[in-house]
Image (tube, helix red, strand yellow):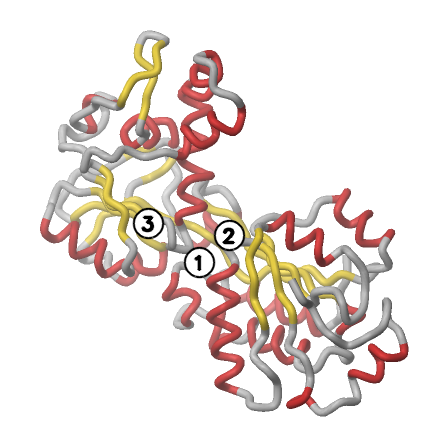
Amino acid sequence: MTIRTIAGLALSASFAFAATASAQNADPIQIAGSSTVLPYAQIVSENFSEASSDFPTPVVESGGSGAGLKQFCAGVGPDTIDIANSSRPIRESEMETCKTAGVTDVQEVKFGYDGIVFATDAAGPDWKLTPDLVFKALAAKTVVEGKVVDNAFKTWADVDASLPSWPIAAFIPGEKHGTREVFTEKLLLAGCKASGAEEAYMASGMDKDATAKQCAAVRKDGTVVDIDGDYNETLARIDSNKQGVGIFGLSFYEQNQDKLKVATVSDIVPSVETISSGEYPVSRPLYFYVKKAHIGVVPGLKEYVDFFLSEDMIGTEGPLAEYGLVPAPDAEREAFRTDFDAGKTM
């Protein structure tokens, strides 16, 4: 990837000179990292560009949290990225790599949470789910008497007698959706391990990568349907199939409680509080990391972060919540902004 074409190494004189150039002629902010954070950063980038003609549209690329942080920690200067997006906290070893390369001042910015809920028609029965029950119902292959076989469960009650005797019909986020990764990580992979399937897959001869891929695979027999549209499409599927189970973002569910009944997961009721505290298991915080040495040098960098953290973006009525972000509580969102403005580093 070409980062910037300005010559120079580290925080060289030529990099400092770039700060004096007009914003219109400046190279864009460079961002890379998490595929989960990618769509949120793209939404912010597009809105930032529309809101201000003073700065070029930031370039947002994916590659994964680890790859983005590796680029971020490569050094300071025009040939390095300004922001790394991450769906996990930066590791101590990554911070050491940063410091070795001269990236000594890193600002960690949490901007919200990734969290999903299971919901059925409002008139339906109560549901109590766990990751292993979800995995057993939706996984492409399960383990029966120690053998790996195609999933043959027909009803939820076949999976566990505590569940309704409804035919299994699940509407899950499509692979392009921002919440598919948390569904895979927190339910399928966690359920695969908890149910003993992971161990059985490896015992059958699968290597680690093949096992992880199998754990993440869902049924293709019509019981599990990928929804590539928004949550309104999932709601419409539930409306037409009153025994269907849908996956929604928390904010969408809260706006449609008259139509939907939410399930507990591991006996935890999903809410902003249980998601932001980490108590609800199908959630995680989302971050991006800012190279403080580039603020005031790369045109528009501080303005971009301020815009990202504005209520217009990360608030309960913003486009990120509409896409699937679980907004942090009011006081926590204010703390995000206060910490960044104070220049707080790790």
Task: Say which residue label 2 marks.
Answer: 276
Quick one: quadrant of the C terminus? bottom right
The image quarter containing residue 5 is bottom right
Left or right position of 126 against 18: left
Left or right position of 324 against 278: left
Nearest to viewer (mark 1 / mark 3): 3
In terms of sequence position, does the residue under pointer 1 or pointer 3 come before the other?
3
Which residue occupies the foreground of this view, 26 or 5? Answer: 5
In terms of sequence position, does the residue under pointer 1 or pointer 2 come before the other?
2
What's the residue type where badge 3 is placed? Pro
Left or right position of 40 against 101: left
What's the residue type where badge 1 is placed? Val
Name the residue at the top extreme: 145
Q: Is residue 235 above or below residue 270?
A: below
Task: Say which residue label 3 marks.
Answer: 173
Task: Say which residue label 1 marks.
Answer: 326
Q: Position of residue 69 (x, y in %)?
A: 68, 53
Q: Is residue 56 above or below residue 78?
A: below
**CB under 8 Å between discs 1 and 2:** yes
